[in-house]
Amino acid sequence: MTVERGLRLMAAVVILISLGMAHFVSPNWLWLTALVGLNLLQSAFTNWCPAMMILRAAGLKDASCTRAN
């Protein structure tokens, strides 16, 4: 798995968990969904996200490093 795919997976899991928490616990959990969306938006323009550093530290490689030329 690459950093990029791991980032999408992490975002999807956090969004689904926050939606479930908003449904069963409190609508305030939707703020977490909004924060994930804003983070994805800014990372689309900057190509930087704090979660990417965590995923790299966990040993995932960038997609550009895994492609064969």
Image (spheres, helix red, strand yellow):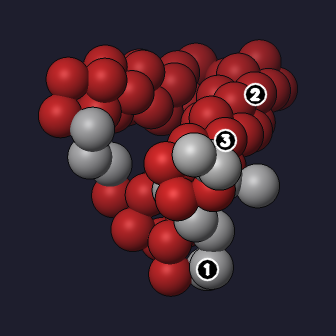
Q: Which residue is mark 1?
A: 58
Residue 50, given in percent of the width and then of the height, sits at 33, 58
> With 50 as the anchor, is 24 left or right in this view?
right
Residue 36, given in percent of the width and then of the height, sits at 45, 31
Tag 1, which secondary structure? loop
> With 25 as the anchor, is 27 left or right in this view?
left
| For marks 1 and 2 on the same chain, the one whose residue lies earlier in the sequence | 2
> With 50 as the anchor, is 46 left or right in this view?
left
Front residue of 48 and 36:
48
Q: Which mark is residue 35?
A: none
Amino acid type at image mark 1: Ala
Q: Which residue is mark 2?
A: 16
Q: Which residue is mark 3?
A: 5
**Screen quadrant of the N terminus:** bottom right
Amino acid type at image mark 2: Leu
Q: Is residue 19 above or below residue 51?
A: above
